[in-house]
Image (tube, helix red, strand yellow):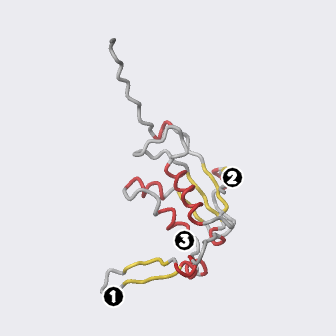
Amino acid sequence: MGAVSHQATQPARPKDTEQTWYVVDATDQVLGRLATRVASILRGKHRAIFTPHADLGDSVVVINAEKIRLTGRKLQQKTYYRHSGWVGGLREVTAEKVLNGPHPERVVEKAIKGMLPKNSLGRKLYRKLHVYPGGDHPHEAQKPEELIIG
C-alpha cells in the first residue's frame, strides 16, 4: 500500500462568495413553506459550498407579507407570547390579530427568525432579511432577482 494523501476540504469563507439579493412575493404563499425556503437562502444552504459556521447566504426581500396564507385554523389558534419581565406580565396575541394589526409583517419575520441558528451567526443572518407588508420596497438599487417559491 502506498502513502495516502490527506487533503482536507477547505471551508468556504464569506469573501469567496458573491452576495446576491432575492425578492419574494408572499401573496397566497403558505407561511411555513415560504419561511423554510427563505431561511435556507439566508443561511446559504442553496450553495454547493455551504459551510455551517460561515455567513454564505444571500439577502432576501419579502413583499406582500400581509397577504400570507395560514392553513387550517392557525389564524385563530396560533398564539404569539411575550413577557414583560414583571410578575403576571405574560401577553399573548393570535396570528389573526397580528395580521390585522399595524405590523402584519411580523408573522413572517418571526417564522423565519425561528428557523435560523440561535447564536451570533443567526442574528447576523436575520439582519439580511427585509420584510414589507405591501408590494413596495426600497431595495431596487440592489437589483434583486425574483425568487419563485411554490
| Pointer 2 residue | 146
Amino acid under label 1? Gly
- Mark 2 nearby-residue class (10 Å; few <14, some 14–19, many ≥20): few
x, y percent for residue 84: 36, 81
- Mark 3 nearby-residue class (10 Å; few <14, some 14–19, many ≥20): some
Tell whether label 3 touches label 1 (CB within 8 Å).
Answer: no
Q: Residue at x 63, y 70 (%)?
A: 69
Q: CA distance from mark 2 to mark 1?
A: 45 Å
Q: Quadrant of residue 6?
A: top left
Amino acid under label 3? Val
x, y percent for residue 135: 69, 66
Q: Residue at x 48, y 38 (%)?
A: 15
Which mark is first along the chain, 3 or 1?
1
- Work out whether residue 123 or residue 35 is closer to the camera in this orientation and state it: 35
- Label 1 residue SS: loop
- Figure quadrant of the N terminus: top left
Name above or below for residue 107 compared with residue 93: above
| Pointer 1 residue | 88
x, y percent for residue 14: 47, 41
Q: CA distance from mark 1 to mark 3?
A: 24 Å
| 61 sits to left or right of 90 | right
| Pointer 3 residue | 107
Tell whether label 1 touches label 2 (CB within 8 Å).
Answer: no
- Label 2 residue SS: strand
Q: Quadrant of residue 124?
A: bottom left
Which mark is first along the chain, 1 or 2?
1
Farthest residue in the front direction? 1
Q: CA distance from mark 3 to mark 2?
A: 22 Å
